[in-house]
Image (cartoon, rainbow, N blue to C red):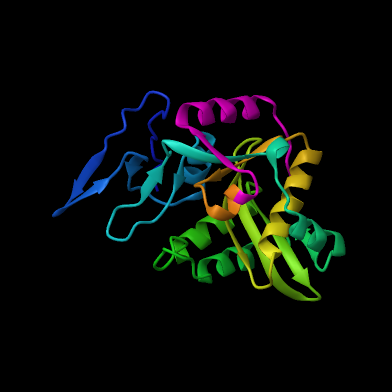
Amino acid sequence: MFSIDFPNPRTHEFVEWVSFGEYFYNAKDIICFGGALTPRNLRNAYARGIFPWTIQGLPLPWFCPEKRAVLEFSELHVPKSLRRVKDKNPFTFSIDKAFRRVIEMCAKIKRQHEEGTWITANFIASYTALHDSGEAHSVEVWEDEALVGGLYGVDAGGAFCGESMFHQRPNASKLALLFLVEHLRARGAVWLDAQVMTPHLQHLGAREISRTKFLQKLAAAQNQNLKLF
């Protein structure tokens, strides 16, 4: 399969609308459409600050949003109620122990204001292959032997790009994120890419920055050559 020649987000002229068939779609956050969802294309995309997100009826869109959600570790806010749960430590945590199970669970979770999931079977296969090559990673939350929460994302050359999370017990996904932050901090990272803002992330201290500023942060992190995992 051919590799996608991704445009440079720093110089690309994003258009506001594109047409497919009878419909126009808002494309101000999309840098290109189509191409195969392969580990090579994923690797090249994340290195440039780009990620895929399925939209039904469209060739695969590749996003580099105008506004990007990031979590600066110095701005992390842990509510007292969550801190109490963390102190009780009701779960155990692991990294990369059950990547495919985590992404499969993320695909099954029903989310408010969303119909279906962008995590298709093709996504699961491609990100699992990226994990097998050492570039996609998961955090697992366990209650005894049961997987009750977790998250996964991609190491974009020293910056972690979070993709999705799930929980089957209260606070399990939030604690997975706190565990990840501690892990990344210990390896020199000071922020992570949360891609799209959600109330959950905002409550923990995430904020939105411009596309330009995000790309600058990504390049600076990549220049540090951090080994995150």
Q: Which of 109 and 156 is in front in this view?
A: 109
Residue 46, compared with residue 102, is above or below; it is above
Is residue 174 highlighted in magenta? no
Residue 198, compared with residue 125, is above or below; it is above
Horizontal and vertical percent for residue 212? 47, 26
User: Which residues, given as a range, are shown in magenta?
Assistant: 203-229
User: In the displayed image of the protein, which residue is found farthest to the bottom?
Assistant: 145
Horizontal and vertical percent for residue 98? 69, 65
Horizontal side of 66 relative to 104 (left or right) equals left
Residue occupying image coordinates x 73% and y 65%: 141
Is residue 204 highlighted in magenta? yes
Residue occupying image coordinates x 25% and y 48%: 25
Horizontal side of 139 relative to 19 (left or right) equals right
Snapshot quadrant of residue 47: top right
Visible residue check, residue 95: no
Residue occupying image coordinates x 35% and y 27%: 12
Residue occupying image coordinates x 77% and y 39%: 185
